[in-house]
Image (cartoon, coloured by chain):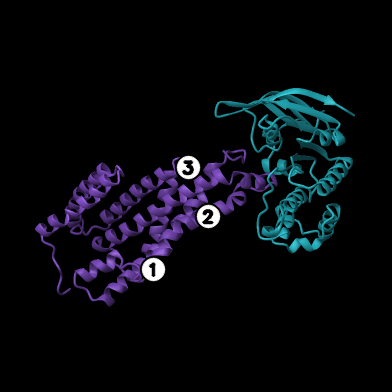
């Protein structure tokens, strides 16, 4: 890549003063987000520096088992966070882990078989991270929507149950609604790619000196893989999670 | 043996007792009106009957067998519940009236649908009507038709005439009376004192989840 724009540490320090703008607005508008903002900035700095060193090490270890272990660790963390959004969902952690795992597995397998990427840590870790975190956000939205729907649409579900319907058919509209809610942000962002924003990966590649056409190829790959992982993970998670809203006697809890 | 028997049934939710120590026998062919102020636990009694909720204390027997021993899906096909707020699904009236056939893996019987429309004095052309174009009263009648496409043993009615005008109330009352005369046991919540006495052979009065009286009037 030619013409790469390296950032000086001093420039970064000056740029960090932009955080003061956020703090000023929070204080001025009494948003009470000052503490939260400071914590998030400090965490971002520490986490990213740490991960920079870790990645430096990880990319040097060419052991596929180690790469697999890291991907599983990332999946577990994502599942743990997604499950927190659906506290009322029984086995939320297991469901989230399984859904994200299958979603990531299918997508990565297609990318590997098509030779779009290779099972190298410097490719698998960042790409895995992208799809796993996207699936995590999608599942959080799915669970939130599902929990809200089972509260507001209880009578609809019970009407179907009262006719002698099983719990899946009684909840099918809620399941579909929740899957849609999980997928929509990814679909919306795909729709507006290049119009509203130049996405992170593409911007990064261009800043690093890659040609825009080369960057677009990568971005399209990212878009496709995010769409497929989100769809698979949302579908599996919602298809399993709705059961948590019923007891063994097919009654809404 | 009673058709449906409540033995010391209580139902508590979030530390609030909604039904307290209810004992009641319902015989086959009974027409029971359930009356009482709003929030007295009337709908909860119906929900207990079709196993949408289970008692927190006591037992309910159907044909002498504990409800807990029935497959809930099969039980609810025999004890049908028509809600106060009719909820129709799918796009058209047809989707709703064909649903009970699909549930039972049976071919749709057009004659039965025609019979139902005739009983409710509605045209069969309504079958293709989109549910969003139905009035509140029409929705209620379609929901009731859906509950009786296959005749249940017990029909639970939760203020089903509250959204209907006088003429449609009379039509629905006639259908319900005919169903009872055909042997279907009816449990009917109504706020209308005249309506509660006109057709019922028993009147159950509930207040704050407790039985105030059970009166046999025929």
Which label was assigned to residue A192? 1
Is A235 in front, or is B88?
B88
Q: Chain of mark 2?
A: A
In the image, which is nearer the foreground, mark 3 or mark 2?
2
Q: Chain of mark 1?
A: A
Q: Chain of mark 3?
A: A
Q: Going 78% across and 23% down the picture, which residue do you hit?
A: B213
Which label was assigned to residue A177? 2
Is A79 in front, or is B131?
B131
Q: Determine whether, in the image, residue A174 is placed left or right of residue A164.
A: left
Give the chain coloured cyan.
Answer: B
Colour that chain A carries in the picture: purple
Residue positioned most to the front:
A28
Q: Locate residue B94: give its quadrant.
A: bottom right
Q: Earlier in the sequence, mark 3 or mark 2?
A: 3
Which label was assigned to residue A89? 3
* Residue A110 shows in this picture: no
């Amino acid at each position: 890549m030619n013409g790469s724009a390296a950032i000086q540490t001093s420039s970064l320090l000056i740029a960090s003063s932009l955080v003061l703008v956020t703090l000023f607005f929070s204080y001025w508008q009494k948003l009470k987000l000052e503490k939260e903002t400071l914590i998030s900035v400090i965490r971002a700095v520490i986490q990213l520096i740490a991960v920079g060193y870790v990645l430096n090490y990880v990319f040097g270890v060419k052991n596929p088992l180690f790469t697999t272990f890291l991907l599983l660790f990332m999946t577990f963390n994502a599942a743990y966070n997604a499950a927190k959004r659906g506290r009322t969902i029984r086995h939320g952690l297991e469901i989230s882990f399984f859904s994200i795992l299958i979603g990531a597995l299918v997508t990565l397998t297609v990318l590997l078989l098509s030779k779009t990427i290779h099972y190298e840590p410097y490719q698998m870790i960042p790409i895995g991270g992208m799809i796993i975190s996207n699936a995590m956000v999608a599942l959080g939205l799915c669970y939130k929507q599902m929990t809200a729907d089972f509260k507001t649409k209880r009578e609809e579900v019970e009407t179907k149950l009262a006719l002698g319907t099983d719990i899946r058919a009684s909840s099918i509209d809620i399941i579909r609604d929740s899957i849609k809610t999980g997928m929509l942000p990814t679909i919306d962002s795909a729709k507006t790619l290049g119009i509203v924003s130049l996405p992170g990966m593409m911007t990064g590649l261009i800043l690093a000196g890659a040609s825009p056409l080369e960057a677009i190829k990568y971005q399209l790959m990212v878009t496709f893989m995010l769409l497929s992982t989100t769809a698979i993970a949302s579908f599996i998670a919602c298809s399993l999670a709705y059961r948590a809203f019923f007891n063994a006697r097919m009654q809404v809890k | 043996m009673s058709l449906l028997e409540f033995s010391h049934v209580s139902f508590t939710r979030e530390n609030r007792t909604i039904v307290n120590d209810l004992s009641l026998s319902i015989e086959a062919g009974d027409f029971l009106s359930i009356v009482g102020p709003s929030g007295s636990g009337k709908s909860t009694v119906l929900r207990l009957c079709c196993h949408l909720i289970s008692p927190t204390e006591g037992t309910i027997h159907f044909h002498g067998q504990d409800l807990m021993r029935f497959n809930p899906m099969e039980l609810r096909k025999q004890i049908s519940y028509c809600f106060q707020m009719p909820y129709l699904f799918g796009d058209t009236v047809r989707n709703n009236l064909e649903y009970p056939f699909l549930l039972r893996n049976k071919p749709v019987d057009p004659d039965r649908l025609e019979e139902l429309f005739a009983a409710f004095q509605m045209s069969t052309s309504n079958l293709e009507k989109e549910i969003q174009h139905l009035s509140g009263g029409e929705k209620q009648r379609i929901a009731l038709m859906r509950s009786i496409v296959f005749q249940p043993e017990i029909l639970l009615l939760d203020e089903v005439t509250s959204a209907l005008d006088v003429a449609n109330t009379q039509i629905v009352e006639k259908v319900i009376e005919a169903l009872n005369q055909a042997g279907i046991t009816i449990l009917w919540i109504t706020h209308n004192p005249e309506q509660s006495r006109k057709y019922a052979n028993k009147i159950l009065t509930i207040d704050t989840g407790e039985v105030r009286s059970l009166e046999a009037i025929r």
